[in-house]
Amino acid sequence: MAMGLGLGSVYLLLLCFVLTSCCNGGISSSYSRTNDISADMPLNSDVFALPHGFNAPQQVHITQGDHEGRGVIVSWVTPNEPGSSKVIYWAENSNVKQHAVGSFVTYKYYNYSSPYIHHCTIKNLEYNTKYFYELGTGNVTRQFWFTTPPEVGPDVPYTFGLIGDLGQTFDSNRTLTHYESNPAKGQAVLFVGDLSYADAYPLHDNNRWDSWARFVERSVAYQPWIWSAGNHEIDYLPEYGEGEPFKPYTHRYYVPYEAPGVHLRFGYSIKRASAYIIVMSSYSAYGMYTPQYKWLMNELPKVNRSETPWLIVVMHCPLYSTYLHHYMEGETMRVMYEQYFVKYKVDVVFSGHVHAYERTERISNVAYNIENGLCTPRNDEYAPVYITIGDGGNQEGLLYEMVDPQPKYSAFREPSYGHATFEIKNRTTAYYAWHRNQDGYSVEADSVWFHNLYWKSLSDSSAASL
């Protein structure tokens, strides 16, 4: 969706900048670090190593494969020939092996030909069960495992990891290692976009999609990463004949968008434990009456907060950010959708894109549109918290220039690499923590307790009626 700006609109945007910057806000961390560009890991690093054996499966990754959490999409690559698209799997305490058969796809991108990319959906798994799974044939089979989530319910505890804008630099490796070693033990990752940064290399070198997938296999082959597409997934290169946006991403990373009632490739929803996750696309059409708009207007009212009280939205471009780079880039999407996030009491919105960390207060600016100039975000106890976590390790470096003084709605911000965890305790309470890479595994550089908005509103309504 695009919006043209006349001189009057530009004046209002500048006015908004002044108004949101006129009073001191929360904490701008004084933690000091180098502002050097993060260097890529050499391609001969062990994190990119090929598995042994001819045509051995590699780049293994899993994600949720259905709406309810009883399905898993297993994806992998065979480099030399198609091989088998079969997945053999069995429960930890069972000797009965089952199998599912998927299919493979290939694609060409300029002068690159992909390997054979397999996708197989395993269905009707038992909840809260550890499964082993095996890929490949003959002497080159590889074995992995995953644990399905608990059955959906309002008081089911569950811990999500949060990572974004990862890339394949030394800092990327530090982030992933830090996440893996976190005592909070994330059970699934909400990934807020920008995976491999292959488009940052000459001619969008798609070999960098392969190296990135080998790098993250050590995590994503064992726990699902819930994918959101970022701007670096667009891979649009029409001057070299590549005019199909998202081609590498859509061939490599399947998501459960074909669940009943969902007809978008980049927007989808899942239930997991006590959470309802809505993934939106910042780089697909989202104006009124577009497929994404119509889907979301149908999706939000049907969320049963008595069953899944925690409502989480994931997208790439933040709706609120006080860093100067990408400043107000998500403004048109905010104007379109913030009113619904407030109406349906979304608990938290996670984004990336801005290569730094920031957490807002519970705020809304639903009165503002580009015509009326009412553009001072205000505290709203029933609005989401907006968290930007685009600090995985990308090769473009961290962002340091911020709106100064810090706007009142910004609670904490710091240009550092890191990851976060969101620990749901029960229907009313969750604990959120952000971990910068430079600290010990259990050190929290920023943290906050969340009180569920749905149950808070019921409690407040009951108290008001007395």
Image: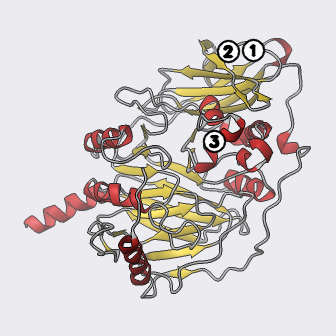
Q: Residues within 10 Å of mark 2 (few under 14, many from 20)?
A: many
Q: CA distance from mark 2 to mark 3?
A: 29 Å
Residue 381 placement (x, y as % from top left): 30, 69
Q: Which numbered dot is residue 415?
A: none
- In percent of the image, x 8 and y 65: which residue is there? 465
Disc 2 secondary structure class? loop
Hey, what amino acid is under mark 3?
Tyr
**Residue at mark 3:** 236
Q: Is residue 35 above or below residue 137?
A: below
User: Does the CB distance between marks 3 and 1 fall below 8 Å?
Assistant: no
Query: Do the residues bearing badges 2 and 3 touch, measured as CB atoms within 8 Å?
Result: no
In the image, residue 289 lies at what x, y percent?
A: 30, 41
Query: What numbered label is drawn on residue 82?
Result: 1
Q: Which residue is mark 2?
A: 85
Residue positioned most to the left: 466
Looking at the picture, tell me which residue is in the foreground, 2 or 64.
2
Q: Residue furthest right?
A: 44
Query: In the picture provided, is 63 more to the left or to the right than 111?
Result: left
